[in-house]
Amino acid sequence: MNQTIAVQSPAPLRKLCTDCGLSRTDDPKRCGQACQFIQPDYPALEQRVHGRQRLQNTVQENAQPDELFFGPYQRILSARMEPPAAGAQWTGITTRLAEVLLEQGQVDAVIAMAADPQDRWRPRPVLVTRAQDMAQCRGMRMGYAPLLSLVEPALAQGFKRLAVIGIPCQIYALRAIQPQLEQEQGLEKLFVIGTPCSDNTTTENFHQFLGLISDRPQDINYVEFRADYKVEVRTDQGEKRLIPFLNLPLSTLPPDFFPLTCRTCVDYTNVLSDITVGYMGGHGQQWLLVRNAQGQAVLDGIQDQLVTSAPISKGQRDGPVRGFMANTERAAGGLPLRRMPAWIKPLVNWLMPRVGPRGLEFARARVEMKAIESILHLRREAPARIKNMLPAHVWQLAARYGLQAETAPPPPPSQVQHIKDPKV
Ligand SMILES: Cc1cc2nc3c(=O)[nH]c(=O)nc-3n(C[C@H](O)[C@H](O)[C@H](O)COP(=O)(O)OP(=O)(O)OC[C@H]3O[C@@H](n4cnc5c(N)ncnc54)[C@H](O)[C@@H]3O)c2cc1C
Ligand code: SF4
Ligand code: SF4
């Protein structure tokens, strides 16, 4: 069985909102405490979900080396499914994890995104109760859809053990309301499989982008912004094109092509999931961050189909991040971007995959770029929101590039009382 439940209430009106679904529930006031864009408290939620906050790489804390960038984790892996799943965005690890949870009877239902029947690029939340129906959720859609509007209807139908697949802004709100779902609505078990996310936009805007890169945008069935600085485009006719990032017609897109939410998103790697499945640090493979014991247990379910390796880390991110910052400062200030002369683009396109940051260094670069972008765009477009919206780790990441908080951000309530777990 596979259901989409009619969404009752209208779409939200807030400017900083990605329509995660909470505002469409019976108690939309919860957005005030549960929204990533209002007053997030990552330390408190990391503590509750993982038993600890992300650690710093200091003598006292003896952190995993990259927790400042990627959030709490136990293991980082490069991985792929063998054989890859047909129709998957990469090799289908994300949907397979949930499929196995259904096969093994560990959950009653999975909440994830499928494609809208009228538009393959438009995400549509679905409640899946049969393992074989997870196949329809494979692949990336561009846009926003109210995933969380299905959680309470699922519980009301008696599906008390759930898995949710979501992007970071959806998972933040889900984790924020999790105690209430447990105490008041009978949620017994929750598995959270997250993907990283960046540069999302409305489905309408994405169609505009497809029209700029192809004469037949209606034939495009796959797009991915790969970690080797190329966009991969596939069509229904079986063609495959690789377009270097520098050759993309991004300059012709309007300045608000990416909504302010996605330009100021502080959780690229989905730090509150049990396991994050992406590609960013995978250097051509998928990239897994196992964040807690439950995430490891979910991964164990697909071990016989998984090929894993240690992630690589090569190149230096400093130059590309500084270049990005200079361009973002110009764009956020309303100035045109500094463009590269046409003759130099092929050279840079050749060089970047070979000498630019790769593997984990690429992922660190992207996380730092997002931190810088969040600060610069909020300073220009919503300065009053900076104090509450930007967590301390964003300032720590940006400090290396000379960006400082105007006044030191107040510690979130959880940090004031935080006692470090001596076991970690
Ligand atoms: C808008 C967007 C931007 C992304 N940006 C990055 C990035 O910068 N770096 C990176 O490493 N990974 C990013 N990802 C994740 C990446 O595209 C893959 O989904 C991920 O690597 C998993 O691949 P897979 O083959 O295991 O997924 P599959 O098994 O094919 O499953 C894909 C899953 O994605 C979910 N999904 C698809 N579209 C949406 C949507 N619009 N909203 C919410 N969930 C959706 C589906 O529920 C499905 O479960 C992004 C995903 C989205 C939706
Ligand atoms: S919690 Fe979700 S629905 Fe509510 S304002 Fe935030 S993104 Fe929008
Ligand atoms: S970039 Fe951030 S805010 Fe935008 S859709 Fe992705 S997770 Fe949500």
Image (cartoon, rainbow, N blue to C red):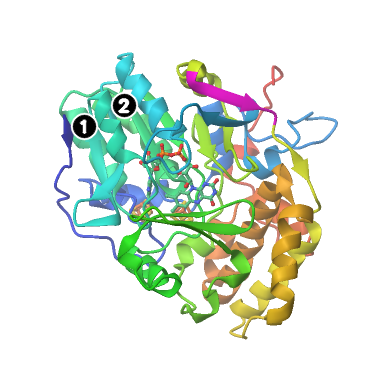
The magenta stretch spans residue 308 = yes
The residue that appears at 82% across and 30% down in the rendered structure is 60
Contact between marks 2 and 1 (CB within 8 A): the answer is: yes
Left or right relative to 121: residue 152: left
Q: Is residue 203 above or below residue 139?
A: below
Which quadrant of the structure image shows residue 231?
bottom right
Q: Is residue 325 above or below residue 364?
A: below
Main SS of residues in magenta: strand
Identify the residue position indicated by label 2 in the image: 162
Segment colored magenta: 305-310
Residue 409 percent coordinates (x, y): 65, 56
The quarter of the image holding the N terminus is: top left
The magenta stretch spans residue 395 = no
Secondary element under disc 2, as helix, strand or loop, is: strand
Secondary element under disc 1, as helix, strand or loop, is: helix
Give the number of the disc on residue 154. Answer: 1
